[in-house]
Amino acid sequence: MTSLACIAFLHALVPIFLVSITDTIGGLIALILAAIWVILMLISSIISIVKAIV
């Protein structure tokens, strides 16, 4: 829901002919942030599994 609000805010900032470009840039930024979050969660879960085994 937050990403939708951010992208809607980006749409309001630019002229109408730049909305599709802004939408693509917003989607890529959301993808990069989600990938970073997944990597951090994966690392922390691996650390927790190793601590539980040892």
Image: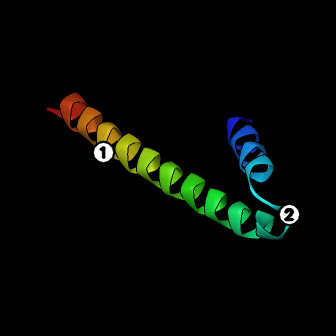
Quarter-of-image position of residue 21: bottom right
Mark 1–mark 2 Cα distance, whole angstroms, equals 41 Å
Residue lying furthest top: 52
Residue position marked by numbered label 1 in the rendering? 43
In this rendering, the label closer to the viewer, 1 or 2: 2
* Rendered position, 24 above or below 45: below
Instruction: Estimate the x, y position of residue 46 in percent, counting from the top left.
Output: 29, 43
Q: Residue at the spot x=65%, y=59% of the render?
A: 27
In the picture, the quarter occupied by the N terminus is top right
Q: Amino acid at mark 1?
A: Ile
Neighbor class of circle 2 (other Cα within 10 Å; few <14, some 14-19, many 20+) is: few
Decide if residue 4 is on the left or right side of residue 30: right
Check residue 35 in the rendering and tell me which mark sits there, or answer none.
Answer: none
* Rendered position, 50 above or below 7: above
Decide if residue 4 is on the left or right side of residue 44: right
Q: Residue at the spot x=21%, y=38% of the render?
A: 50
For mark 1, give the secondary structure. helix
Q: Amino acid at mark 2?
A: Ile
Q: Nearer the viewer, residue 48 or 9?
A: 9
Q: Residue at the spot x=73%, y=61% of the render?
A: 23
* Rendered position, 12 above or below 48: below
Check residue 16 in the rendering and tell me which mark sits there, or answer none.
Answer: 2
Q: Residue at the spot x=13%, y=32% of the render?
A: 54
Instruction: Estimate the x, y position of residue 13 in percent, counting from the top left.
Output: 74, 49
Neighbor class of circle 1 (other Cα within 10 Å; few <14, some 14-19, many 20+) is: few
Q: Earlier in the sequence, mark 1 or mark 2?
A: 2
Quarter-of-image position of residue 44: top left
